[in-house]
Image (tube, rainbow, N blue to C red):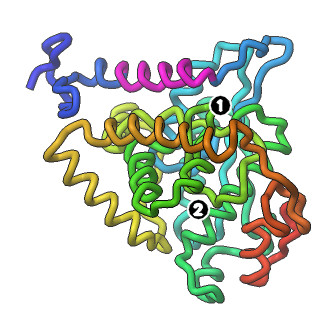
Amino acid sequence: MECDKCGEDAVMHAAYSGLHMCEAHFRRSVDSRVRKRIREDSLLSDDATPEDPETWLIGLSGGKDSVVLTHILHDTFAADPRVELVALTIHEGIEGYRDASLDACLELTEDLDIEHEVVSYADEYGLEMDDVADDDPLNMAPCAYCGVFRRDALSQYAETYGADKLLTGHNLDDEAQTAMMNWLSGDVAQMAQHFDASLGSFDDREVDDDPFVPRAKPLRDIPEKEVALYAHLTDLPSHMAECPHASEAYRGEIQQYLYDLEADHPGTRHSIMSGYEELARLAAEAYRGGDDEPRGECDRCGAPTNNAVCRKCELVEAVGGDAASGD
């Protein structure tokens, strides 16, 4: 196959657009789409100046998505004094897994000369995920605990750093899967809660736990396989292994369903996202009237929540950790 733009050997074919692209044009395409998303979501405030720059905290796990996001953000803003990038890696306490991805994070941030912080569940909550997975008092999947702890840690450190934005590496497949799961649950109120009208993004965080700072997902237009190819072609350090405790069976079913749909009907993921974002926006307006702030604070840790105790503190106490250590 030849690149449709220059005639060089193509490295990929985007069925949803029909384009064949060589390495140079493929990488340029990914860069362009991410930067377009940053512009369309107005991530960089007009108020940001070299004297008073914005701080963007990047959730850097060492996997392909967060590594590619960090690389593109650095390429885009390294020479822009209006933005300061800080990478945060969270060590969950999973033997033989996070240590390897932490090495990738350290290598990348050293190469790019980006400030890098590492925090752990052990320090924050007095627990490790290996122990939680072995002794599960609530009979939940390990991912259900870990997701709540991770979101809380990201939010806490975003507040600590005075971050203006919290950026994560969710790709198009991640977002389409979440959209389908939310839609199939039939919970319109939760759909509204997941939508952040200011940045046009949403996720599967708990309904009562809003982040301290706005979240953004600049990779949400890029298919997962394209992210992986970009990481490979750019020779970025990344850890590709799956977490040994991963057990989101329902998400896995949705993932396979969307793979099959996309293979038969290219562009399905993009169509899902286009429709879902509009539905989520309308639902948010109906349920919240444009006000997405939680109504109170957690009695234990002070985190924003609509309940007396936030979900994170409930789970930390259930597994015998220190619910107050995240203050």
Query: x, y percentage for residue 182?
Result: 47, 56
The residues colored magenta run 28-42
Decide which of 125, 111 is in the foreground and name it: 125
Split into 4 quadrants, where in the image is the N terminus?
top left
First along the sequence among labels 2 and 1: 2
The amino acid on which the numbered mark 2 sits, given as a three-letter code, is Asp
Residue drawn at point x = 65 percent, y = 82 percent = 131
Q: Is residue 34 magenta?
A: yes
Decide which of 107, 1 is in the foreground and name it: 1
In front: label 2 or label 1: 1
Quarter holding residue 81: top right
Cβ–Cβ below 8 Å for labels 2 and 1? Answer: no
Secondary structure mostly seen in the magenta stretch: helix
Query: x, y percentage for residue 301?
Result: 88, 63
Q: Disc number at residue 198?
A: 1
Q: Is residue 228 visible?
A: no
SS state under label 1: loop
